[in-house]
Image (cartoon, coloured by chain):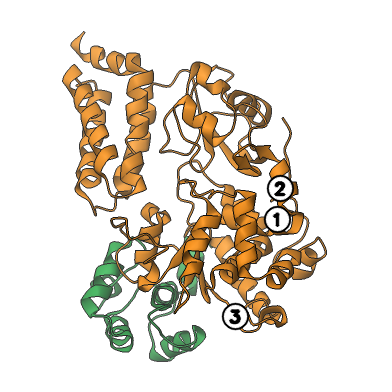
Chain colours: A green, B orange
Amino acid sequence: MCVSEELKNMKTFDMQTYQNLIKDVGGLTVENLFVFLCKVQETFGCVPNEVVRDVAMKTGFSEARIYGALTSYREFKVGRECGD
Amino acid sequence: MKEIKLLTRRVGTYEPPDLKGYEAQGGLVALKKALAMGPESVIDEIKRAGLVGRGGAGFPTGPKWAMVAGEKQGQKYLICNAEEGEVGTFKDKVLLDGDPWLVLEGILIGAFAVGAEKTYIYINGEYDQTIELWDRLVVEARKAGLLGDDILGSKLSVDLQVVKSKGLYITGEELALISSLEMRRAASRLKPPYPTEKGLFGRPTVVNNVETLANVPVILAEGVEAYRRLGVEGEPGTRLFSLSGDVKKSGVYELEIGSGTLAEFIEEFGGGTAGGRPIKAVQPGGGTSRFLAGDSLKCKLTARAILQAGSGIGTAGVIVYEEGKSAVDIVKGLIEFYGFESCGRCAPCRIGVVRIKEIIDKVFGGEGTDEDLEQLRQIGKACVAVSTCGMGQAFPLPVLSALELFPQDFEAAIEKVSA
């Protein structure tokens, strides 16, 4: 998929789409967290702060660990980059 | 020299994710056979076949599986490494796109043999169409009862997650890959413990390359004896070679191991060099392998022969460079890439790659001195000796071998200034 096409398909963040994504992966677990956050990035073009807070609560990982991991990958956009 | 279609024989004959096309050509026979044989016998067969990993390190697959299968309690994982980030390597894509069911069958047999219920396939983020195809493939497989519970009416239950890699070279390294799935930054760690003891989430984990897993159904379907008839003593079977660089025809070719020499392969399949000039150097195992030149190009296409010639077969990504290019130029391009991709976890690689890059830039810019070359050698050797993972141990190899094989190129670059 080319970049412009990807941008066209990108949605702005809303809770309903986010909840549907969780349903799609069959519930959020430690085992599929990375895959899930990849899906969040692909759908919304970034991983907003509230998603990080939510997944941290649901998986028991600290927010710091999730931010630490996400920011080390070139293709994730986090926090301020999403306009948070 | 002839191409042998063993793993790639169904590529292009059916339209994935069409399962019927795969089954019509002898697909799933191996999985059914494996389910009837039981896990121990499957591992014995793979051991007898002498299959070694095709991802670069060349670790024997049978013993690796046996280690994980030995752990009886709790969750185990199998990861198919389709990151394929190595420079000059693109063989796995042929299998992932052309015959994905073969790879999936390999994953299922592997999961059955080691007792892993959760499996992952970690695909290079740049393979967009491949990832789309695999997403559809997983849906098809669930419908056909090949993923989920009670696969093909047996007690086997396996689930597969398709993971899109997030654009880092280092995630091709097994421990960095595991770290990334564990929601950590992608960086390697010290071994031991090996992933077979403490891998994903601290549980025993098998990490296999795509081509390795694609060999598994072939071995079981054809039988060990038939498989061992191909190849040479100690290295049975075929291998997918990716040919690129200064050749007329680049591409992926499946060859019987040891069926010809490196020079013959480049001549017959690549159609000779692109500019018609003689070959200057060849990297036989991807961008991190040592250069081969001159008579050493007459080595057979086996891991042992290439090692004896002074390089390594690695991922079997053959990169050809023809006369007319300076070795400094070639090495500069490679080091720029590896400098960008070092994960920064261990000091020798993190600092060494930057220093090497600085010195090469200096030499390339015509400001180098003899001491600089000596320093290159020292830093390179230090990185090889003490880096944590395969990348840090391997990226200086092209630099070191270029210094050995083409000192005149470096000296010419230095003398340009002093003159």
- Which residue type does callout 1 highlight? Val
Q: Within 10 Å of the Cα at label 2, are there few (<14), some (14-19), or many (20+) other Cα atoms? A: many
Mark 2 falls within which chain? B
Report, in whole angstroms, how far the alpha carbon at label 2 lies from the one at label 1. Answer: 8 Å
The residue under the point 48% across, 68% down is B70
- Residue with the mark numbered 1: B218
- Which residue type does callout 3 highlight? Ser
Mark 3 falls within which chain? B
SS for dot 1: helix
Q: Quadrant of residue B332?
A: top left
Report, in whole angstroms, how far the alpha carbon at label 1 lies from the one at label 3. Answer: 22 Å
Query: What x and y, as percent, mark residue A11?
Result: 43, 79
* In the image, farthest residue toward the top: B419
- Residue with the mark numbered 2: B227
Disc 3 or disc 2, which is closer to the eye? 2
Q: Quadrant of residue B137?
A: bottom right
The residue under the point 23% across, 47% down is B350
- Residue with the mark numbered 3: B157
- Above or below, B319 against B349 in this view is above
* Picture quarter with the N terminus of chain B: top right
Q: Nearer the viewer, residue B390 or B263?
A: B390
Query: What x and y, as percent, mark residue B128?
Result: 53, 61
Disc 2 or disc 1, which is closer to the eye? 2
Q: Quadrant of residue B36?
A: bottom right
- Which residue type does callout 2 highlight? Tyr
Q: Are marks 3 and 2 in contact (CB under 8 Å)?
A: no
Q: Are marks 2 and 1 in contact (CB under 8 Å)?
A: yes
